Amino acid sequence: ETGVTQSPTHLIKTRGQQVTLRCSSQSGHNTVSWYQQALGQGPQFIFQYYREEENGRGNFPPRFSGLQFPNYSSELNVNALELDDSALYLCASSLEVGGAEQYFGPGTRLTVT
Amino acid sequence: TQLLEQSPQFLSIQEGENLTVYCNSSSVFSSLQWYRQEPGEGPVLLVTVVTGGEVKKLKRLTFQFGDARKDSSLHITAAQPGDTGLYLCAGAANTDKLIFGTGTRLQVFP
């Protein structure tokens, strides 16, 4: 059984640029959630995807967008990067929507300069 | 707004000591998870508690869900340096998101 994988591991971008982060869900999991974790804080929910549709969104602006593909992998896109977007971005997959047990990938560390 | 507050924020103890971490909210959760996170890695699920009053044991770790499903505790017996990490509680209130606590950073010295 393959766990959740994310790419890239680290990324450095300049303010105003755009970034795409990728996530492959755990085998058999059809739901993917994205979280932002600032240094020293707990993860904050960005949004969730189920069967290629957004299924809930946290308090993040529209410049945070996502996609889910037929194989349940997912992308997180952030436009017009701001310095405060610097964080660890975590992807989590679950067996089904409403499944509270979420399994996290190692994260992508994004630094915006 | 649903919030989960953890206490203490930081804990620094010697190997062999016992400790308890608390996770409190004014909201009711359908279930609550505990995760452990090490630097540069994603959170790893330790346990899920669902029923009010439920107690689960995982080796030296004991997890309890409050009767009203608003709070939880994690007790570690005879802590070891390998227990060092960030402990996060997370509550599930609906079908989409987990609400994470503020985290407790534990350091166990040999």
Image (spheres, grey):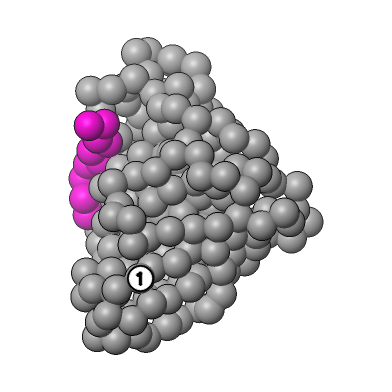
The foreground one among A43 and B81 is A43
Split into 4 quadrants, where in the image is the C terminus of chain B? bottom left
Split into 4 quadrants, where in the image is the N terminus of chain B? top left
- Type of amino acid under label 1: Asn
Vertical arrangement, residue B29 with respect to residue B8, above or below: above
Residue B84 is covered by the magenta coloring? no
Residue B74 can be seen, yes or no: no
Estimate the x, y position of residue A62 in percent, counting from the top left: 33, 56
Estimate the x, y position of residue A82 in percent, counting from the top left: 23, 73
Chain ID at mark 1? A
Question: Which residue lies at the image location 35% right of the left edge and 71% below the top edge?
Answer: A79
Q: Secondary structure at mark 1?
A: loop
Question: Which residue lies at the image location 72% right of the left edge and 54% below the top edge?
Answer: A70
Considering every residue shown, the one lying at the far right of the view is: A1
Q: In the image, which residues are magenta? A: B1-11
For residue B63, side relative to residue A80 (left or right) = right
Estimate the x, y position of residue A12 in percent, counting from the top left: 37, 86
The foreground one among B92 and B8 is B92
Question: Which residue lies at the image location 40% right of the left edge and 33% below the top edge?
Answer: B91
Residue B6 is covered by the magenta coloring? yes
Q: Which residue is mark 1?
A: A79
Estimate the x, y position of residue B102 in percent, counting from the top left: 26, 47
Mark 1, other Cα within 10 Å: few <14 / some 14–19 / many ≥20: some
Q: How many marks?
A: 1
Residue B72 can be seen, yes or no: yes
Question: Which residue lies at the image location 38% right of the left edge and 77% below the top edge?
Answer: A18
For residue B47, side relative to residue A47 (left or right) = right
